[in-house]
Amino acid sequence: MSVDLPKEKKETNNNINLIVATVLAILAVFIFDYFFPTSESIDDKGVSSSISSSTKEVKVPSTVEVEEVSKEDKRKEVSREEVVIQDNRIKISNDKLSGTLRLKGSRFDDISLKLYRETLNPESPHIVLFSPSGTKNPYFAEFGWTSIDREILLPDHNTAWETKTRELTPLEPIVLKWNNGKGLEFIRTISLDNDYMFTIKDKVINKGDKEVSLNSYGLISRTGVPAEDTNFSYISFDGLLGVMEDTLEEVRYKDLMEEKEESFTTNDGGWLGITDKYWLSALIFDQESKDVKTKFSYHNLNRKDVFQADYLLSTQIVSPGEEIETTNHLFVGAKEINTLDAYSEEYNIPRFDLAIDFGWYYFLTKPFLYILDFLNTFLGNMGLAILVFAFLLRLVVFPIANKSYISMHKMKLLQPKIKELSERYKDNRQKLSQEMMELYKREKVNPASGCLPALIQIPIFFSLYKVLYIAIELRQAPFYGWIHDLSMPDPTSVFTLFGLIDWPIPGFLDIGVWPLIMGITMYIQFKLNPQPADKTQAMVFAWLPVIFTFMLAHFASGLVIYWAWSNILSIIQQRVIIFRMDRQLKKNGKLSRL
């Protein structure tokens, strides 16, 4: 036998269900994003493949094999500047990069970013990506040739290349030469564009009397695991990644330390490398090559963690009197969306934009980043771009929100009648349920329609949250006043009177001005909505703005500003609707005509 509950109980249950469903949805999104960072990620051994039997003895030199610094000369770790001075090097310079190329081994191991600094202090050091061997955490890239024939003398990490050029710029490429003394001449031409891309053209001329089989390779080696943002490390992927067979493959450092090696084969182009939240080093091999072997590997060298990403192209035969040539690329720089997209189109690099961890919300996060970047270019301030973006979103959902707010205000106007019916039929639950449904039908009110704006806001909120955390375009982007970095939390605190009182407080009490504004606007919204009949439920709803204020206080200030401004726009929209409905109600006296 079914039992109909009173309206108050039904409303309470519905509200509780809404809260529980919302909280569970939020938890589900975070948990899902933690365990499955991107929709394209695959951890499938079936896709992995070891080097085929025909090339099983041809392999890319391992960092463990070539990096024996401490064993060779027992040299202690020194500064990057000291190591650079000791070697014969070529200067590297363009609008965005500075550094040097080590002639010994033709190694890219000294690269800094001119446009990015470690902190907001304009005197702080530039971001350093590549560092040479002998420093604390070497990080470098190499290109070369290997062969199944171990008797062939090939250039390696100790090879002293010769050149007449002393600086590599966009206007002046460099040409490196080396002869093995046994009939093979190696010529390497390196060029650099105005952004972050190096082009490496390798030519081998066979002046001997035997044909030679060679395989071109490239590698990136990194020593040490970079420091993580422990509070939000699950949001952004750090580690080794690449696109093979049009599929994004990602391996976190800790997973590779367990697996030791992950291998793939691609016949459809691709790229691979090592990524941080904002920075990327990537090998882009010849996109026309087939049967390309790619690999992520881990070794422990002298008690240090060494990670390597490398590729091996298929075998090429160079006969006496002939030559072979291959062209590959190296990206070292910031993950700027427009730059990555331009490279993807120029060099036909598949899905190069996935170097940015857009996650499962790719269909929203990437367009959001495009819009914010465009608005920032137009307005000259990313904070203003966020405000305009929030306004545009309100316009998009305006019709839906309008219907919802109208229904919510009708529900609020019906509260006296609902209370009257509850008193009249408090002993007859079935009759009360019938009367309530009749009242809703007569007044054309849908009690559930008020939830729609909240449900729409959830994916928008999390997508924007992702963008604000991962996008280099928002790193150290200022707003106005005390907000100097929209990607960081509001630096002020209510409990220190915004810096006037200098006393230690627990981290969870760092409630800045913008989180406080967001909490106040959220409370005003709560007061505009129909109040739950149940006192306990009303108290829970009243505390939600306080809870969210403490939660969001440690999120990116850009996100808090977005939410606060969006709340203000919603309040204005609701107040206009309430004013118009109340005025019409006075004229016709019937709620159903509103």
Image (cartoon, grey):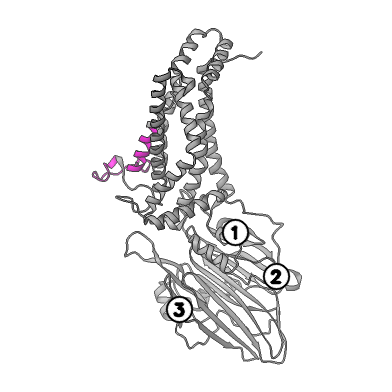
The quadrant the N terminus occupies is top right
- Would you name the residue on which mark 3 appears? 169
Q: Which residue extends farthest right?
A: 53
Residue 404: horizontal and vertical position, in percent? 49, 31
Q: Nearer the viewer, residue 113 or 158?
A: 113
Q: In this rendering, is residue 350 above or below 402?
A: below
- Residue 261 is at least partly visible in this image: no
Residue 340: horizontal and vertical position, in percent? 52, 63
- Residue 577 is at least partly visible in this image: yes
Q: In this rendering, is residue 128 above or below 406?
A: below
Amino acid, disc 2 = Lys
Q: Residues within 10 Å of mark 1 (few under 14, many from 20)?
A: some
Tell me the SS state at disc 3.
loop
User: In the rendering, which numbered label is found on residue 256?
Assistant: 1
Amino acid, disc 1 = Leu
Disc with the residue nearer the chain's start (1 vs 3): 3
Does 502 lie within the magenta span? yes
Alpha carbon separation for disc pair 2 and 3: 32 Å
The answer to whether the residues at label 1 and label 3 have Cβ atoms under 8 Å apart is no
User: Range of the magenta residues?
Assistant: 495-523
User: In the rendering, which numbered label is found on residue 290?
Assistant: 2
